Amino acid sequence: MDDDVVLSAPLFATMEREETRRLFESMTEIDLSRGEVLFREGEPGDRLYVIGSGKIKLGRRSTDGRENLLSILGPGEMFGELSLFDPGPRTATASAVSEATVHELAHQSLVSWIEAHPGVATHLLHALARRLRRTNETLADLVFSDVPGRVAKALLDLSNRFGEQTDEGLRVAHDLTQEELAQLVGASRETVNKALADFAARNWVRREGRAIVLLDVDRLERRAR
C-alpha cells in the first residue's frame, strides 16, 4: 500500500498514528508516467515530496546539454526538503524513471507542522545529512575510482534499495536506460557498457533489459572498493 510506504518516511517518524494520518491526508497525490517531469532545475521550490510507488530521478543539465544523474529515489524516500531550510530555485530536475506516485506537501503546511512537532525537523535534518554524505562519497568516487569500480558500486547501491532476492541471485529492476545508467555513474555509455559486459563475462551479473541480476555480490563488493 502506498499509504504505509509514505508513512515510513522520516517526515512521520516522531508522530502518533492519528497525527500521522492527519498530515498524510493534507498531502496531494500526484501520478506520473515514465519520463514525466515533476519540476525543473531553476524553478521556485516550495514543496516537499514523498514517493509512494515507482522511481524518481534527480538530475542536472549543463549549458552544453549534457546530463548528470544525481540520484535515483524509490518508495518511502523524500526529496525537495531542501527548500524548507534554504528556500530558492530548485537545484535539480525531478522526473519519473517509471510510472510513479508521489505525495506533495506545501511549504507552509510543512512549516506549521514542524512548529507544532519540533522533533520532525531533526529527522528531516538526518535525511539531508545522509544525502550530503552520499553526495560526498559520489564526488570522491569520481576522483579516486575507475569506471568499473563506480559501476559496481552503483549496482550495489541500487540493489540495496530495489533488489529482490531470487534463486539465481539478487535481481535489481532499476528501470534505467543505458544512457541513464551511464549518467548515474558519470561516464560514457560505451565505457559503462564495456564494464557491464566484462562483469557478465566473469559471471558476476546477468543483464535483463532494464534490470540486472547480481550473481556474485562478493566480487562486486571487492571491485567497488
Image (cartoon, helix red, strand yellow):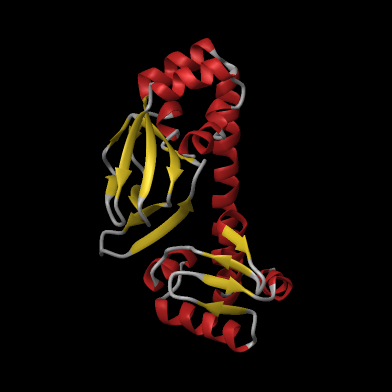
Q: Nearer the viewer, residue 138 or 76?
A: 76
The quarter in which the C terminus is drawn is bottom right
Image location of residue 152, percent across then percent down: 60, 71
* Farthest-out residue, top: 116
Q: Is residue 78 visible?
A: yes
Q: Nearer the viewer, residue 105 or 146?
A: 105
Q: Is residue 89 visible?
A: no
At 31% across and 59% down in the image, what residue appears? 62
Image location of residue 30, percent across then percent down: 31, 38
Where, by quadrant of the figure, is residue 111 drawn?
A: top left
* Farthest-out residue, bottom: 201
Q: Is residue 72 left or right of residue 26?
A: right
Image location of residue 164, percent across then percent down: 60, 61
Q: Is residue 39 above or below residue 159?
A: above
Q: Is residue 175 left or right of residue 39?
A: right
Image location of residue 129, percent across then percent down: 59, 38
- Count of marks overlaid on the render: 0
Q: Nearer the viewer, residue 175 or 126?
A: 175
Q: Is residue 61 above or below residue 19?
A: below
Q: Nearer the viewer, residue 37 or 214?
A: 214
At 56% across and 64% down in the image, what residue appears? 154
